[in-house]
Amino acid sequence: MKTEEEHIEVREKLLKLPRVNAREGFENNLLRRINLLDTDTVKSPATKSSFWLSLFGKKSLAWTIPATSLAIIAIVFVGVYFAFYNSKDLQKTSTDKSSPNQQSSVESLKINPLTSESVKNEIPGKDIANDLEINNAPKVERKSDIDKGLNEMLIEQTPKPIVPSKINVIDSKKESTIYEKADDVGKTDKSIKQSDEKGNGINKGVLKEEKKTEESVRSKEPEKKISSPLLKEPDKNNVKTEKSDGKTNDKQVEKTNEKIFDKSQEKKKVVVKDKQKDTLKEKPKEKEKAKGVEEQQKKKEVKDLNKESLEKLKEKIKEN
Amino acid sequence: MAEYRKYTDEELILKFQSEDVEAFNEIVFRYKNKVVNFLYRYTGNRDEAEDLAQDTFIKVFRSKHLYKEIAKFSTWFYTIAVNTAKTNAKKKSRMSTISISDFDPDNEKDFDLKDPNQSPEDNANSGIENYYIQQAINSLDEDFRNIIILRDIQNLDYEEIVKITGLPMGTVKSRINRGREKLKKLLIDIYPYKES
C-alpha cells in the first residue's frame, strides 16, 4: 500500500485514462474470421485432390491431356514388347539346349515345364503355344527311357496291345494241353494285374513274361515228345497186340491203359485246380517258382507212370 | 442473449465447451472492450489492438477445451491476450526499423512522426495529456508495461496478475513500483510544464 501511496498521482492519471472500446463491426469481423478458419479447415483436404485439376483444369495446360495419354500408351507398349521378347528368348534357349545332347535335353526338359508354366502365367495370348509345349513335355517321364534314347518312341510303346498278341501267338503255335491252358490263364491274369498295378513299368513286366513264356514253351516241348506217344501208345499197342497176341492180352492191356489214363487225368485236374487257386493267391514270382516245381513233379509222375505202364506191358508180353 | 447474462464467466465457458455458441457470443460481448482497451494501451494502436483482440477471441474459440475450472476465466483470457501481444511485439521487433534522422545527418534533431492510425477523434477523446501518457507507457519495457497496464489500467488484483504473468508476487510488486517510477520520470520529461 505504501508503494501505491508513493505514486498515487501516476496511478490516478492511469486510472483516469479513457476506456477504448471496440468498434461496432468488431463482432461481425470476428465471426467472419472464425467462419473463414472453419472453411479453411474444411477445404484443406479438398485441396489434396486438386492435383488433377491443376494438371488438366487449366486451359493453358490442355495439351497435357493427349501428351500424357500417348506417353502412357507408349510405356505400356514397350512393357508388353519386352515381356514377349523375353518369353521368346526363353523358348529359343530351351530348344537350343534340347538339340545337341541328350543330357542337355534332359536338363531342358526338367526346366521347361516350370518355365513354360511361368511364361504361360505371365504372358497373355501365349496359352495355345505353351499348352502344346506342355503336352509334349510330360510324355518323357522316365529317366531309363530317356537314357535309352526312346524319347520319340514312347508313344508307340504301349504295353497293353503287346501282351495279348504274343500270348495268342504262343497259343496258336502250341498244341495246348490242359496244363498249358491253365498256365496261360494264370499268365494272362498276371499280365493284366501287373499292367494294372505298375502302370508305367509295363515294358519290364512284358519282357519278363515273354522270357517266361519262351522258357515254359522250351520246357514243355520235350513233354510233348514224351507224353504224346504215351497217350497214343495204348492205341498202337492195341493194334500190335491185336495183330500179334490174343484177345485176352488185348483186353487186359486196354484196361490197364484206361486206368492209367484216368488216374493221370484225375491227377492233372486236381493239380490244375490247385494251380489256379495258387495263382490267384500267391504272388507272381512265387507262383512261377511253384509252377516250375509242380511241372517238374508232374513230369516225374508222368514219367513214372509211363515207366510203370511200360514195365507192366513188358511183363505181360513176356508172360504171354 | 438475455438468458446468458445471468451466468458467470466460468459457466459460460463450460457451456461453450459443450458446443453452445451463444455462450461464446456472451463472452465476446463481456470481454471485447476490456481486451481492446488492454491491447490498445499495450500497443498504442487501435486497429492493431482490435486485430489482436480478435486473435485472442479466435484462440479462445479454438482452444476452448484447454480451459479448466481451476482458475478464473478472466485470468485465462488475459494470459492469452498477453501472450498474443508479446508474440506480436516480437514479430514487430524482427522487422527492421530505420530512423528518419539517419537520412538527415546535418539536422541532428530527432523527431517523432504522428501515428497515422491515430485518428483525430481518438486524440480529441484522450486529449493531449492522455496522448503523452500513452507515449510514456509505450516507452516502457515490456516486462513493466504488462504489469502496469494490468494493475493500474485494467485494475486487476495482484494475485490475478501473478497467475497471468506466472511471476512471483515479489517480482510483480517490485516491477509495478519500478514501472510507476519510470512513468513518472517519463511524464516529467514529456510533459514538464505541468510539474512546473
Image: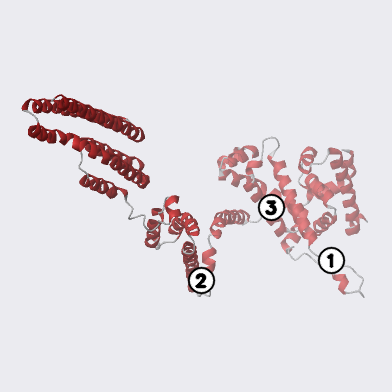
- Badge 1 marks a residue whose secondary structure is loop
Amino acid, disc 1: Asp
User: Label 3: which residue?
Assistant: B53
Q: Dot 2 falls on which chain? A: A
Q: Judge from the rendering whether residue B31 lies leftward or rightward of residue B150; answer left or right.
A: left
| Place of residue A259 in the rendered image (x, y in percent of width and height, measured from the top left) | 15, 25
Q: CA distance from mark 2 to mark 3?
A: 55 Å
Q: Judge from the rendering whether residue A56 lies leftward or rightward of residue B166; answer left or right.
A: left
* Residue located 21% across and 36% down the image: A227
* Residue located 78% across and 37% down the image: B159
Q: CA distance from mark 1 to mark 3?
A: 27 Å
Residue B112 numbered tag: 1
Q: Earlier in the sequence, mark 1 or mark 3?
A: 3
Could you classify mark 3 by the number of other residues whose Cα lies within 10 Å: few (under 14), some (14-19), or many (20 or more)? many
On whether disc 1 and disc 3 are found on a single subunit, the reply is yes
Taking A215 as reference, is B135 above or below it? below
- Badge 2 marks a residue whose secondary structure is helix
User: Label 2: which residue?
Assistant: A71
On whether disc 1 and disc 2 are found on a single subunit, the reply is no
Determine which quarter of the picture holds residue A123: bottom left
| Place of residue B130 in the rendered image (x, y in percent of width and height, measured from the top left) | 80, 56
Could you classify mark 1 by the number of other residues whose Cα lies within 10 Å: few (under 14), some (14-19), or many (20 or more)? few
Question: Which quarter of the rendered picture does the N terminus of chain A lie within?
Answer: top right
| Place of residue A233 in the rendered image (x, y in percent of width and height, measured from the top left) | 16, 35
In the rendered image, is residue A280 in sight? no
Query: Which residue occupies the foreground of this view, A200 or A236?
Result: A236
Question: Which quarter of the rendered picture does the C terminus of chain A lie within?
Answer: top left
Query: Which residue occupies the foreground of this view, A198 or B173?
Result: A198
Taking B32 as reference, is B132 above or below it? below
